[in-house]
Structures are given as C-alpha cells and as structure tokens.
Image (cartoon, rainbow, N blue to C red):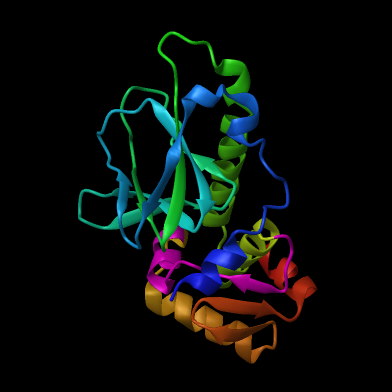
Amino acid sequence: MHAYTTSRIAAQSRTPQPHPSEVFHPALLQPLSFFSAGAEIYAQGEKAGAFYQVEFGAVRIYRLLADGRRQISAFHLAGETFGFEAGTTHHFFAEAVIATGIRVFRLAAGADMSGQLLPLALKGLTRAQEHLLVLGRQNATERVAAFLVDMAERQGDLRQVELPMSRMDIGDYLGLTIETVSRVFTKLKERGVIRLINLRCVEIVKQDALHLMSE
C-alpha cells in the first residue's frame, strides 16, 4: 500500500547530500535495515554513536512534551541523513513514517570523522533553521504553504508532491491542529493553488502563488 510513496519519495532532494558510502570506509557501512510504518528507529535517551541515511521511505524526528503532546522537529526523505548528536545520547525519537529502509553508519572508536561528518551535519542544521523560520510564520496558510514548497523542492520540484506523513504529522510539525491543517488544504484547493489527488499526494497548480504565500 506504500509502494506509490516509496517510489516517488525515492527521488533525490534538490541539493543531494554526499552519500556516506562515498566518504566512509566500507567497514563502517551496516546492512540495510527495514522498518514498518510506525516502527521506532531509536528512542530519546538511547545511546548515540551512529548516524542514519534514508534509502527509501520517510522518517519523523520528534519529542514528547511534558503534557504528552508530540512535537515533530523534522522529516527525512530518501537520501537524507539524521541522528547526529552533540552528546552521547539521543535527544529525540526517530520513527518510520511509512515502510522505510535505513542504512546505519557506526563510527569507529577513536577515529576523527569530523571532516566527513561536517557537510552532512551542516545540511541538517540548515534544514532545522528553515523549520524555525516556518514556525515563525504568522498564520496557518503561510506555514502550510512553506511546508508544501519545501516538500516539492526536496522531491526535485515536481508538480505532484508525495506527502508520506499524515495531516496529524503535518500539524505536529507546523504547530497546528489537524483541523487547521485540513482547512488550509481545502482553502488552497478552492483557490486553485493545489489539487488534492489523494490524502498522500498533492499537485501544485499555481507554483508562484504558493511561493508568495510561503514568504
């Protein structure tokens, strides 16, 4: 049931990251691991010491707040890396959004990998900063528009954008309720800016208008 998403989300981002297999010794490369939808990849508080690359599918990174609410800090698509930590433990949960293949790279003890890790870490930092800018938008329409623009760019500027995550996921990522997210999607559809092909696929009809809303 996730085949359509897996194939489309496998498209490379607009700015491909260097693949870890190109910069790390083959001995550090672990076999491909498969995770079903909703499966935990690692938990908050678990020991860190590896990083991960999405081969296909999608991953959400989140933290549970004190009141039980979930805050998603990032989504990672095919070709993107995650799991970098400043300390020795993970500060967030990582979970497969759909059926997902993950390549794990374990760092050799005592090895200086700073040169290889820096470009990958900076890419993640830039994306985190972009997410903060999205959360700083004044209204829900701007946030959803910025999210759709980002997803489209990460999938090669395709007009038909796959959204492997649910509306609830999008809400937890943008700081909105699921009802608000659904209303904004409906409003964008009624304005002719997007076409809802199905729950997990959106066609961007008016790219310029969507970009203006996201700014």
> Which residue lies at the image location 55% right of the left edge and 50% below the top edge?
131
**Residue reaching furthest to the right:** 208
Does residue 139 show up? no
> Which residue lies at the image location 26% right of the left edge and 49% below the top edge?
65
Does residue 86 show up? yes
| Image location (x, y in percent) of residue 200 | 51, 76
**Residue reaching furthest to the top:** 110
On the picture, is 67 further left or further right than 83? left
**Where on the picture, by quarter, is residue 139?**
bottom right
Dividing the image into 4 quarters, which one contains the C terminus?
A: bottom right
Up the image or down, 132 lies above or below 179; here it is: above
Up the image or down, 114 lies above or below 61; here it is: above
Q: How many marks?
A: 0
**Residue reaching furthest to the bottom:** 190
Which one is nearer the viewer's eye here, 22 or 158? 22
**Where on the picture, by quarter, is residue 206?**
bottom right
> Which residue lies at the image location 53% right of the left edge and 69% below the top edge?
5
On the picture, is 141 further left or further right than 165? right
**Where on the picture, by quarter, is residue 49?**
top left
On the picture, is 90 further left or further right than 182? left
Up the image or down, 82 lies above or below 186; here it is: above
Which one is nearer the viewer's eye here, 209 or 42? 42
Up the image or down, 150 lies above or below 159; here it is: above
| Image location (x, y in percent) of residue 47 | 28, 28
Dividing the image into 4 quarters, which one contains the N terminus?
A: bottom left
> Which residue lies at the image location 43% right of the left edge and 36% below the top edge?
83
Q: Is 158 inside the magenta-drawn segment? A: yes
* Range shown magenta: 156-173
Q: Is 179 inside the magenta-drawn segment? A: no
